[in-house]
Image: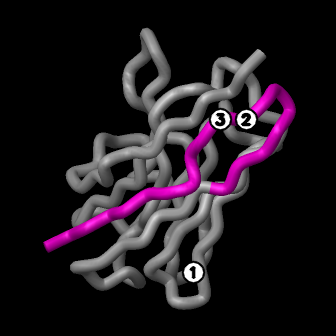
């Protein structure tokens, strides 16, 4: 059974930073991409950043370029999202996701994954 457990969300001021973590289990991590999605108020859930743990290739949505960085942990079953220069519009629920049909980070981030974590709340105060 695929399990994705996020942590690291919280309250931060404008311009601050957070690092989200996702611990994955129940599948072969090297064969599939892992990624971060978010749902902010009034918008559809969207891909933020995704990574292929085997070769390290990443994909970033426009909203993440230059401010967010996705990385894998040493054991490959952990994926991080470092978020810098946070803005109020970044507030929302951040989800870790994977799809056992996609090894490409681009494919994962641009389609709707089948496996989701429970989400972690990020609030950026103005």
**What is the x, y in percent for residue 43?**
43, 15
Contact? badges 2 and 1 (CB < 8 Å)? no
Q: Nearer the viewer's eye, disc 1 or disc 3?
A: 3
Q: Residue at x 71, y 49 (%)?
A: 18
- Secondary structure, mark 2, is strand
Contact? badges 1 and 3 (CB < 8 Å)? no
| Cα distance between the residues tagged 2 and 3 | 4 Å
- Secondary structure, mark 1, is loop
**What is the x, y in percent for residue 56?**
61, 75
The residue beneath circle 2 is: 12
**What is the x, y in percent for residue 62?**
67, 33
Q: Which mark is residue 11?
A: 3
Q: Is residue 79 left or right of residue 99?
A: right
Compare residues 111 and 39 and report the one nearer the observer.
Answer: 39
Q: Is residue 87 left or right of residue 79?
A: right
**What is the x, y in percent for residue 106?**
49, 53
Residue at far front of view: 11
Q: Nearer the viewer's eye, disc 2 or disc 1?
A: 2
Residue at far bottom of view: 75
Residue range of the region highlighted in magenta in the rendering: 1-19
Image quarter where the N terminus lies is bottom left
- Quick one: label 1, few (<14), some, or many (20+) residues within 10 Å? few
Residue 9 lies within the magenta run: yes
The residue beneath circle 1 is: 55
Contact? badges 2 and 3 (CB < 8 Å)? yes
Would you identify the image quadrant in which residue 24 lies? bottom left
Of callouts 2 and 1, the N-terminal one: 2
Q: Residue at x 44, y 80 (%)?
A: 77
């Amino acid at each position: 059974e695929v399990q994705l457990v996020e942590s690291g969300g919280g309250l931060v001021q404008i311009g601050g930073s957070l690092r989200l973590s996702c611990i994955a289990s129940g599948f072969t991590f090297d064969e599939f991409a892992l990624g971060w999605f978010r749902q902010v108020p009034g918008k559809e859930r969207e891909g933020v950043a995704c990574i292929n743990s085997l070769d390290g290739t990443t994909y970033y949505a426009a909203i993440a370029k230059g401010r967010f960085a996705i990385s894998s942990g040493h054991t490959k079953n952990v994926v991080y999202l470092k978020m810098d220069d946070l803005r109020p519009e970044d507030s929302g629920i951040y989800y870790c996701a994977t799809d056992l049909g996609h090894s490409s980070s681009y494919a994962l981030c641009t389609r709707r994954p089948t496996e989701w974590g429970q989400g972690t709340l990020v609030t950026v105060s103005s």
